[in-house]
Image: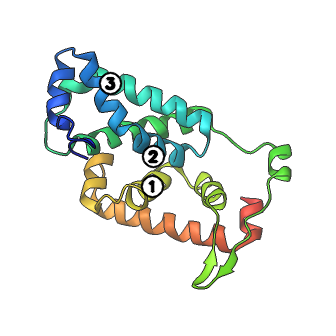
Amino acid sequence: MGAGVGGGRPDTELVVLAAGGDQAAFAELMTRHRPRLYAVCRRITAHDQDAQEALQETMILAWKRLGEFDGRSAVGTWLYRVATNAAIDEVRRRKRTPEPTESEAMPEPTPSRGADGPVVSRMDVDRALAQLPPQYRAVVVLRELCDLSYSEIAELRDIPIDTVKSQLSRGRRALVELLTDPSVARTA
């Protein structure tokens, strides 16, 4: 997550410029990281509108807090932290629960079998992720989608590594259960 495609300026340079008030540098930084930040927000919130709200909050907070970036981690990792916290806050704020009409209209997860075993659609994964507690959802997304290490997640979430491992294990177990047992997905 350093320089952009085409040899753009390094993230650290953009942060320094943006922290000094350079809006163009901030726009370049956000353009570079926006797709991944949105993906994190979308997976944690499990809802497009909530993800957009969390992404907006991420960009506002990043702009306000650029001076706090200390360079101990990559700029992208710092932005993940901001996005993850904004997305968790959005989930807590909304406390979304499926409305009866939505859940009735939504088809249940139907794993099919491919050459290498069960195949699960992205919608099924999103639906299952949405049923996890926000802290488990965040850790699973950061590990599986963002490919962050346990120590990076621990630093980013400000929790011990053992907690990361525990939440990741519980989150993965719950996902497997939700994706393989249709009765759990319907009642959860």
Where is residue 118 drawn, in percent x and y?
63, 79
Q: Which residue is mark 2?
A: 40
Cα–Cα gap, marks 3 and 1: 25 Å
Identified at 14% across, 43% down, the residue is 72
Q: Nearer the observer, disc 2 or disc 3? A: 3
Q: Quadrant of the C terminus?
A: bottom right
Question: Which amino acid, by three-letter code, is at mark 3?
Answer: Ala
Where is residue 133 drawn, in percent x and y?
54, 52
Dot 1 surroundings within 10 Å: few (below 14), some, or many (20 or more)? many
Toward the viewer: 118 or 175?
118
Q: Which residue is mark 1?
A: 141
For numbered disc 3, what is the local secondary structure? helix
Question: Which amino acid, by three-letter code, is at mark 2?
Answer: Val
Q: Earlier in the sequence, mark 3 or mark 1?
A: 3
**In the shown orientation, is residue 127 left or right of residue 14?**
right
Q: Hey, which quadrant is residue 76 in on the image?
A: top left
